Image (cartoon, rainbow, N blue to C red):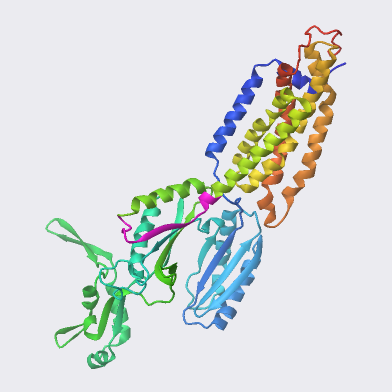
Amino acid sequence: MKANLAGRLADAFLDSKLTPLIMAAALGIGVWTLATMASEEEPQIVVPLADIYLPLPGAEPQEIENRVLVPIENVVSGIEGVEYVYSHAEQGFGLVTVRYEVGRDMEESLVRLYSTLGEHMDRMPPGMQMPLVKVVTIDDVPFFTLALSGDPGSGGQAGATQAGTTQDGATLRAIADEVRIELEQVPEVRDVSVIGGYLREVRVELRPEQLAALGVDPVIVQQRLAEANVQATSGDLVRDGEVVRVTAGPFLKTIEDVEGVVLDVRDGSLVTVGDVAHVFDGSSEVDHYTFDVRADADEALAFAPLVTLAVAKRPGADATDLGRALEDRVEELLGTVVPADVDARVTRNYGETARDKVVTLQEHLLMAILAVGLVVALAMGWRSAVVVMVAVPVTFALTLFVYQIFGYTLNRVTLFALIFVTGIVIDDSIIIAENMERHFAMKDRPLRAAARAAVDEVGNPTVLATLTVIAAVLPMLFVSGLMGPYMSPMPVGATVAMLFSLAVALIVTPWLAYRFLRHGHDESGQAEDRYV
């Protein structure tokens, strides 16, 4: 009687030196994958989303809705793959949010959006400025935040605090801008935004009586300031064989620069901005406040000025490694860019929380593997447990490698998928090992023939059982909506793990059982080999 495919495959690797090499290579690939695979708290979900900013200065919200938003909504709704369109109108400004179906290609979706907007710009009203399209992704959500705070009581604007303090909202904002520049230089950082504090502002307050006395139109003041605050190349002057480059500028930087801008010439005298206006260099007008609420020694609430830096990472970047790199960079800035009297605290680091959750799931995975091994050892003996449990690290190592090829990261969903299939992936090896041990105990044929016959006997049912489990799990891959890509590591991981476990059961497990489970079996046997 001829052996079937399972028996011939097991027999081919039973004495092959490739088998231990395959095991070593699989484990090596697994170690390399764990060392290089990016870890995150949540899986990556591709949902093409874009905000279209539509400025129409001077227009009322009702006019913007009727003349801008409604035509744009009709146009972008017809783009293939667009699922939802939201719009919002304000004074002189409109916003349209376009969301594509989950899983759509980001670049292709944006190209279609840009081309469609360009084709229908003739439908926009006169005076509307060019639309601005900003892409929104899951990586735009800050994963790392750094808070800079001062002492309670120093939350006023510059000049309103105690003498010598460097912790008011305006100064904290200036410090945060310097820190932002440093953090943006860290590799894999996508964007750093500053929230809170008071922006620097050079404010020109016109004096009506002086304007009237000198006959200066306020519009002229605005135009002259805009014309003076320019730096550009005006041309080249050739003289005596030399070329002198002439530039206009530089930008206005100080109060004196602004006050010295010439508005007009009257009776041979220059009329400047300083003659008709007061110029202030300080904080901008306050439209929001950010405070760090603390309790003092008397347990009374105190409010300290607060500025926060929010860091977003690039897609696919390892959140854990990047979070640690940012923390190290912040430590280097303390005492130099960040003064000693400024409190710098990391208030959010999803890299560390992701690592904590990944480590917790890895511990649970190890506990699940040990629990399964203990059950097998109690039921089949320690030798069989060793043979069976080798299938787990080999299978998981190859599964993680496939995860990385498909672009998945190490997160709680991918790890949960491995925990989910821990008990399933050793089923095939248990069947093969148990049947081989039974045939070895019969001692009715040579050892090699017994091994081949054992695999041959249960090979087809094992393959069928594996395919049945895959058929039950794989339909999860076609779940629509946001849950589809979020849960996709489950069916992908289970399917890949089951296929690898089947290969391990037919190649690695017979090789190990042939050496661990013979129990003094006589190599010659008592019966002739009927498997040809």
Can residue 127 be seen by looking at this rendering? yes
- 367 with respect to 291 (left or right): right
Quadrant (top left/top right/bottom left/bottom right) for the N terminus: top right
Q: Is residue 484 magenta?
A: no
Image position of 215 (left or right of 431): left
Task: Between residue 302 and residue 289, name the one nearer to us.
Answer: 302
Horizontally, is 85 left or right of 328 in the view? right
Q: Residue at x 68, y 34 (%)?
A: 370
Q: Quadrant of residue 231?
A: bottom left
Q: Is residue 224 above or below residue 98?
A: below
Instruction: In the displayed orientation, state which residue is furthest to the left.
Output: 240
The residue segment tinted magenta is 336-353
Q: Nearer the viewer, residue 95 or 432?
A: 432
The percent coordinates of residue 519 (x first, y second) are: 76, 15
Question: Where does residue 61 sit, x and y in percent of width and height?
Answer: 55, 81
* Residue 263 at least partly seen: no
x 34%, y 54%: residue:
334
257 w.r.t. 194: above or below: below
The answer to whether residue 123 is above or below residue 271 is: above
The percent coordinates of residue 15 (x first, y second) are 70, 15
Q: Residue at x 26, y 84 (%)?
A: 277
Q: Is residue 349 found inside the magenta-colored segment of the image?
A: yes
Give percent across and percent down for residue 309: 43, 60
Name which quarter of the figure residue 225 lies in.
Answer: bottom left
